[in-house]
Image (cartoon, helix red, strand yellow):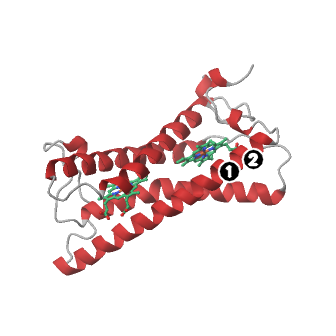
Amino acid sequence: MTDTLKTDSKSYNKVAVWLHWSIGILIGLLLVIGFLMGNIPKDDISLRALVYNWHKTIGMLILVLSVVRLLWKLTHKAPAPLPGLKPWEKMVAKSLHSLFYVFMIGMPLLGWAIISTSRFPSFFFNSAKMRIPELPFWQGLDKVAKHDMHEFFEETHELMAFAGIALIVLHVFAALKHHKTGKDILVRMMPNYMRKK
Ligand code: HEM
Ligand code: HEM
């Protein structure tokens, strides 16, 4: 068996660790860009297009990586729960991890729905040759109904961003708490070369 497929039952394997940190960093980046980009002056059209299109491009990458991560999780054994956890702690950890998947996949899907109900096209890498395809579901709606859907998706995307931040705060708090009480929780999610032998 290759190293990537091996689960030593105490730690996450290479692929899970790589996906965890790359998605985590990209989500952090998009939360910052997302909340700042609304402040770009409306008349600076080229800067707005650049930042918004990169937000969308990175968001679509997160969608792909998160689907891969979900498939990986469903097809590979996760390490055993951290030893010494109370049953309610195990249940809360599991529920929070599941909510993360709703966030990691739901957030980009909502973004995709925003651009699919917009009057303006969006482009991967801000390149005029690479239009991001629109989802077909709302294309038959009249102008007003489409605009209403657009606003609904924008608001839900924003609300979900706040819910995601709350999740991340809880998650980091739990990880640091268990780390402080001597459980090797952080080590489970570290690349191999950072784990103590
Ligand atoms: C947007 C940021 C983050 C997301 C979406 C995220 C998501 C997740 C998810 C879904 C899991 C469950 C395992 C899996 O399915 O792969 C997990 C585990 C873990 N995460 Fe994060 N995470 C984020 C940031 C962080 C940060 C900043 C830390 C460091 C403090 C961290 C530390 C851990 C640890 C130690 C585990 C293993 C938990 C265990 O062994 O039960 N995560 N994370
Ligand atoms: C996990 C991935 C994503 C995160 C964390 C994220 C985060 C955010 C945040 C924090 C905002 C600002 C919300 C507000 O103040 O209204 C925002 C706005 C926006 N996002 Fe995302 N986003 C993600 C994925 C996407 C994707 C994939 C697209 C499109 C393909 C997208 C399109 C947009 C658009 C068009 C806006 C502006 C909405 C408005 O003006 O109200 N996002 N995003």
| Residue 32: assigned label | none
Q: Is residue 164 left or right of residue 157?
A: right
- The answer to whether residue 97 of the structure is visible from this angle is no
Q: Amino acid at mark 1?
A: Phe
Quadrant in which residue 190 is drawn: top right
Query: Residue sitting at 82 percent across and 50 percent down?
Result: 85
Query: Residue sitting at 23 percent across and 53 percent down?
Result: 133
Is the residue under label 1 in contact with that under label 2 (CB below 8 Å)?
yes
Percent position of residue 136, x then y: 25, 64
Report which residue position mark 2 lands on: 177
Percent position of residue 19, x then y: 52, 38
Q: CA distance from mark 2 to mark 1?
A: 6 Å
Q: Nearer the viewer, residue 188 or 50?
A: 50
Query: Residue sitting at 45 percent across and 67 percent down?
Result: 159
Percent position of residue 44, x then y: 16, 52
Q: Residues within 10 Å of mark 1 (few under 14, many from 20)?
A: few
Q: Amino acid at mark 2?
A: Lys
Whether ligand 1 has any atom under 8 Å from the Cβ at mark 1 is answered as no
Q: Is residue 3 left or right of residue 52?
A: right
Give the vertical position of 142 relative to 73 (above or below). Answer: below
Quarter of the image that includes the C terminus? top right
Quarter of the image that includes the N terminus? top right
Q: Quadrant of ligand 2?
A: bottom left
Q: Nearer the viewer, residue 181 or 86?
A: 181
Give the vertical position of 191 relative to 186 (above or below). Answer: above
| Residue 173: assigned label | 1
Q: Is residue 8 left or right of residue 167?
A: right
Q: Secondary structure at mark 1?
A: helix
Quadrant in which residue 142 is drawn: bottom left
- The answer to whether residue 172 of the structure is visible from this angle is yes
Q: Is residue 47 left or right of residue 92?
A: left
Percent position of residue 111, x then y: 34, 59
